[in-house]
Image (cartoon, rainbow, N blue to C red):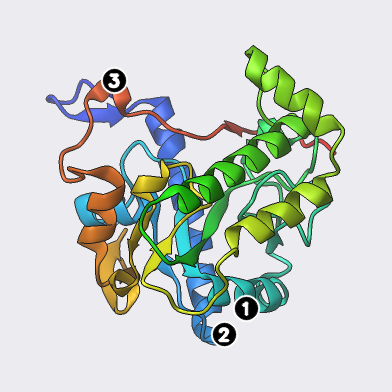
């Protein structure tokens, strides 16, 4: 993602790499503001997903990553949803099924809305003009076992509901028969009903501490989502883009469960961004 600059072998970033880095810096600003809000409110959070991996392996963003993911235990997640919107406004909007009509996601998004953000997500422009840079916040749910039929059924139902929601709201193309069928079924189901079912399915076992925690709202297979609850019993500070950020004390177990050999970067052909940000897209409502 770099090119020769002609000055003695030095390299200059390609336009694509420069844009990605600019987006990452905007998202870092959101992270710092969310971190400050959580500190003010006494809410515990952890780096999660690829952001945790980036902190461990790269001391910052994975170079080809274009988002930030945080995780919170369900009780902290609900407190954030109640208290953070007022503290983060007007610069940010906390997006959730309870704050956005026709909401397309099962998780909280903290979205930059102040000014005219350079980067936008075109795939949700037909639903909201608040589609600029963001960070995702995933809930951690207590589950009694790390595997078994019950957990598989719970995770499968969540995947089904999530698929019906995104196809109903047309945030993904219906490129095959299965997706077209989900779009057809989704048209008959109110988004509010799908979100109520998602809430029920995620919180099936309640918030009483149990032996395991699962990030059921992620897109990983269920076997890669569940870790012993003790992995999140403590907090350690890891450097992320020059800033100390909270990570679970059992970060190695969390990462190895989700990614396997997480210290070895994937081959270049797999180093791709996962989201649909476009620069200077027209604002639509």
Classed neighbour count for the residue bearing mark 3: other residues with Cα under 10 Å, few (<14), some (14–19), many (≥20): few
**Which of 35 and 234 lies nearest the eye of the viewer?**
234
Give the residue at mark 2.
41
Look at the numbered disc 1 and give the secondary structure of its residue. helix
Q: Is residue 28 above or below residue 169?
A: below
How busy is the neighbourhood of tag 2: few (under 14 within 10 Å), some, or many (20 plus)? some
Q: Nearer the viewer, mark 1 or mark 2?
A: 1
- Identify the residue under disc 3: 269
Q: Is 130 located above or below residue 33 in the figure?
A: above
- The residue drawn where x is 71% and y is 69% is 89
Please state if 94 lies on the left or on the right of 206 as rendered.
right
Q: Report the residue that reaches farthest toward the top.
A: 176
- Tell whether label 2 touches label 1 (CB within 8 Å): yes
Local secondary structure at mark 2: helix
Disc on the earlier residue, 3 or 1: 1
Give the distance between the C-alpha atoms of the residues marked 2 and 3, in whole angstroms: 42 Å
Q: Earlier in the sequence, mark 1 or mark 2?
A: 2
Q: Which x, y percent locates residue 108? A: 62, 58
Say which mark, if any, is on residue 199: none
User: Residue tagged by mark 1?
Assistant: 79
Give the CA separation, mark 1 to mark 2: 9 Å
Circle 1 crowding by C-alpha within 10 Å: few under 14, some 14–19, many from 20: some
The image quadrant of residue 124 is: top right
Comparing 57 with 82, the one in front is 82
**Mark pair 3, 1: CA separation:** 40 Å
């Amino acid at each position: 993602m770099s090119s020769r600059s002609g000055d003695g072998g030095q390299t200059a970033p390609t336009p694509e790499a420069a844009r990605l880095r600019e987006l990452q810096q905007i998202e870092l600003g959101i992270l710092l503001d969310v971190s400050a809000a959580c500190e003010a409110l006494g809410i515990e959070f952890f780096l999660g997903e690829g952001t945790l991996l980036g902190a461990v392996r790269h001391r910052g963003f994975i170079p080809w990553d274009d988002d930030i993911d945080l995780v919170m235990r369900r009780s902290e997640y609900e407190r954030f949803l109640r208290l953070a919107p007022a503290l983060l406004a007007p610069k940010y909007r906390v997006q959730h099924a309870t704050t956005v009509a026709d909401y397309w996601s099962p998780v909280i998004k903290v979205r930059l809305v102040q000014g005219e953000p350079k980067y936008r997500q075109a795939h949700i422009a037909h639903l909201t003009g608040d589609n600029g840079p963001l960070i995702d916040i995933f809930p951690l749910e207590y589950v009694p076992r790390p595997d078994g039929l019950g957990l598989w059924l719970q995770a499968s139902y969540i995947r089904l509901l999530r698929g019906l929601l995104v196809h109903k709201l047309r945030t993904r193309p219906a490129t095959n028969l299965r997706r077209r069928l989900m779009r057809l079924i989704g048209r008959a189901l109110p988004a509010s009903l799908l979100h109520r079912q998602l809430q029920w399915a995620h919180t099936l076992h309640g918030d009483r501490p149990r032996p395991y925690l699962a990030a059921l709202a992620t897109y990983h297979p269920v076997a890669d989502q569940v870790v012993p609850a003790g992995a999140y019993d403590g907090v350690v500070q890891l450097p992320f883009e020059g800033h100390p950020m909270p990570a679970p004390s059992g970060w190695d177990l969390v990462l190895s469960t989700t990614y396997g050999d997480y210290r070895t970067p994937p081959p270049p052909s797999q180093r791709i961004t996962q989201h649909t940000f476009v620069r200077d897209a027209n604002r639509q409502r």
